[in-house]
């Protein structure tokens, strides 16, 4: 499980996370919703040590993320992350993109890496595109490639940061379907999303972030359908769902 305790983080003089406490149990899907600038992306980046924290602790399956002894490659294998902007290499094929980190970071032999990568491409519905250039894929397909690439590392946790926000509306569905499939398989996930209806459907819990704090967290039927916090209510009133 992921245990986040009293996490504080600033950028320069500006306090961004002001005491985040959250536990994600194995098999849970926790969605983070909330206004732009409230620290959602910053928290996800702290979870796999892409950003350091100032105080508090983050412990993943008993390993302190910020201990000097922690192997960061191993941590980032355990926790996969997919962003709104996918860093795909245009000069490599879809398959090579998917297999790259396995070969370079995990030192998996080429053939095995490519088999594992191909299996994940099939899973996200891109098996037939393996040999193509990623530049020939639609935005939704590129995002599914980014998800397959993360899954190829066999993570125990997946973090998704607004993975549908850059997509045309008609492409959002196919990416949400991929996330739904992962949740049904029991993948433990933390997802930052503006897709409120989707969050309600797949989440075990929803956290509402406001100005660097979790203003409200609970089951979707509580946080989304009957929010207790006035800021949550105001935020949801402005969302389409
Ligand atoms: P959210 O994902 O909820 O929109 P972010 O976590 O991206 O919010 O950002 C929270 C605040 O931190 C914003 O005001 C943003 O400008 C600031 N911020 C994010 N990353 C950096 C950075 N690397 N350097 C300085 N400020 C940053
Ligand atoms: Mg963000």
Image: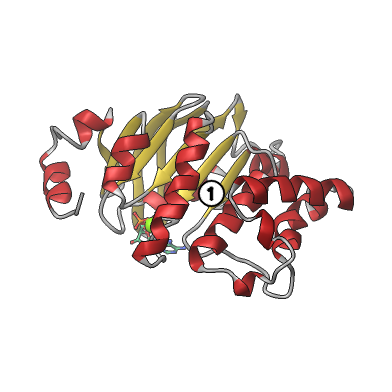
118 horizontally vs 83: left or right: right
Residue under the image location 13 percent in, 32 percent down? 228
Q: Residue at x 52, y 38 (%)?
A: 182
Q: Can see residue 48?
A: yes
Q: Quadrant of residue 157?
A: top right
Nearer to us in this view, 214 or 28: 28
Q: Compared with residue 131, is residue 114 higher up or lower down, i.e. above or below?
A: above
Residue drawn at (38%, 67%), measured in percent from left and top?
168
- Nearest to the observer: residue 30 or residue 54: 30
Q: Quadrant of residue 71?
A: top right
Percent position (x, y) of residue 133? 69, 72
**Measured from the top left, where is residue 89 in percent x and y?**
68, 70
Say whether residue 113 is left or right of residue 77.
right
Residue 39 in picture, x, y percent from top left = 36, 51
Q: How many marks?
A: 1
**Ligand 2 image position (quadrant):** bottom left
Q: Is residue 116 above or below residue 201?
A: below
The one of 18 and 181 positioned closer to us in this rendering = 181
* Residue ID at (14%, 45%): 231
Residue indicated by mark 1: 52
């Amino acid at each position: 499980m992921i245990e986040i305790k009293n996490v504080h983080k600033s950028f320069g003089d500006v306090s961004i996370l002001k005491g985040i406490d959250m536990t994600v149990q194995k098999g849970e899907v926790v969605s983070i919703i909330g206004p732009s600038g409230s620290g959602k992306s910053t928290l996800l980046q702290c979870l796999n040590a892409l950003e350091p924290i100032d105080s508090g602790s983050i412990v993943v399956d008993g390993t302190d993320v910020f201990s000097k002894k922690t192997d960061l490659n191993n941590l980032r294998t355990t926790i996969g992350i997919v962003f709104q902007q996918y860093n795909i290499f245009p000069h490599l094929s879809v398959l090579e993109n998917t297999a790259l980190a396995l070969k370079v970071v995990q030192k998996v032999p080429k053939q095995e890496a490519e088999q594992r990568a191909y299996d994940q491409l099939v899973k996200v519905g891109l098996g037939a595109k393996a040999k193509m250039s990623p530049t020939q894929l639609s935005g939704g397909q590129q995002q599914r490639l980014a998800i397959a690439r993360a899954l190829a590392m066999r993570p125990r946790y997946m973090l998704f940061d607004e993975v549908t926000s850059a997509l045309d509306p008609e492409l959002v569905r196919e990416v949400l379907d991929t996330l739904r499939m992962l949740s049904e398989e029991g993948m433990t996930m933390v997802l930052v999303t503006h897709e409120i209806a989707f969050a309600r459907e797949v989440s075990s819990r929803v956290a509402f972030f406001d100005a660097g704090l979790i203003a409200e967290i609970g089951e979707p039927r509580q946080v989304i359908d009957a929010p207790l916090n006035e800021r949550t209510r105001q935020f949801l009133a402005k969302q389409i769902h």
